[in-house]
């Protein structure tokens, strides 16, 4: 395109919900069976690692049974005309499978495991389970490659720098309630155009945001139609 634009897409659970990925807030979902701090915190890991392994093994199994949806695929298609980077709070691999090529996983990746003692010792495991007693090359218990409550988000500074260079910041399926990810909006350049796709009312003050009150798949189609003519 004549005016090549850089798009940064900040995605949350809402973009994967239409693929069948259960979110924290879904009633009747797998999260309701557990206290969040028991299965999504570093304290929970130290308290009951076997429960944590079981929980993420079930999530990994579920991930293998779902497919990317149109919202994932449209984001990938935008790479034909725009420089697109995705900063996602999701731990699934649906963006990759949808065809996107530049993805930052703020909260880790479900299809990877890592050493319990060396966070940089990471291995691909696909949709396979992690068993209690299964060790990393350094001899420590393998754990999910997930950033839990109580742990630092190592890629947040990288994400902030990328957001600061965006011409268009697109927020899809994020309530902007989970920090530090929600704080990334504040790094957008004052001249950047910001879009937010969510079927629910999202309260956010401080920036002029164009709201698209639709689910992710429908909203992404509207977003694509609008920006292609910019």
Image (cartoon, rainbow, N blue to C red):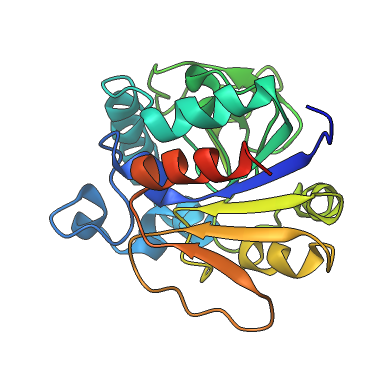
How many marks do you count on the picture?
0
| 17 displayed left or right of 3 | left
**Quadrant hosting residue 142:** top right
- Viewer can see residue 88: yes
Query: Looking at the image, which residue is at 72% across and 50% down?
Result: 168
**Quadrant hosting residue 102:** top right
Q: Nearer the viewer, residue 77 or 136?
A: 77
- Position of residue 112 relative to residue 84, above or below, is above
| 123 displayed left or right of 56 | right
Query: Looking at the image, which residue is at 40% across and 18% down?
Result: 127
- Position of residue 38 relative to residue 126, above or below, is below
- Position of residue 66 relative to residue 11, above or below, is above
Percent x, y of residue 190:
83, 69
Percent x, y of residue 93:
49, 27
Quadrant occupied by the C terminus? top right
**Quadrant hosting residue 113:** top right
Percent x, y of residue 206:
68, 83
Residue lying furthest left: 28
| 202 displayed left or right of 118 | left
Q: Nearer the viewer, residue 125 or 54?
A: 125
- Viewer can see residue 93: no
Query: Looking at the image, which residue is at 61% across and 28% down?
Result: 78
Quadrant occupied by the N terminus? top right
């Amino acid at each position: 395109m004549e005016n090549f634009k850089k798009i940064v897409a900040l995605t949350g659970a809402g973009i994967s919900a239409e693929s069948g990925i259960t979110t924290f807030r879904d009633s009747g979902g797998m999260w309701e069976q557990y206290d969040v701090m028991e299965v999504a915190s570093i304290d929970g890991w130290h308290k009951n690692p076997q429960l944590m392994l079981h929980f993420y093994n079930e999530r990994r199994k579920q991930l293998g049974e779902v497919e990317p949806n149109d919202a994932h695929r449209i984001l990938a298609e935008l790479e034909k005309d725009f420089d697109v980077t995705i900063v996602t709070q999701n731990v699934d691999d649906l963006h990759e499978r949808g065809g996107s090529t530049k993805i930052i996983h703020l909260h880790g990746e479900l299809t990877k495991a890592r050493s319990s003692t060396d966070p940089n010792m990471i291995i691909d495991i696909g949709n396979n389970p992690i068993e209690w007693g299964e060790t990393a090359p350094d001899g420590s218990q393998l754990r999910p490659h997930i950033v839990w409550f109580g742990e630092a988000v190592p890629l947040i500074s990288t994400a902030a720098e990328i957001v600061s260079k965006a011409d268009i910041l697109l927020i899809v399926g994020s309530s902007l309630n989970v920090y530090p990810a929600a704080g990334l909006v504040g790094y957008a350049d004052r001249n950047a155009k910001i879009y937010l796709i969510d079927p629910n009312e999202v309260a956010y003050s401080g920036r002029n945001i164009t709201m698209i009150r639709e689910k992710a798949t429908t909203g992404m189609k509207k977003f694509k139609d609008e920006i292609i003519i910019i």
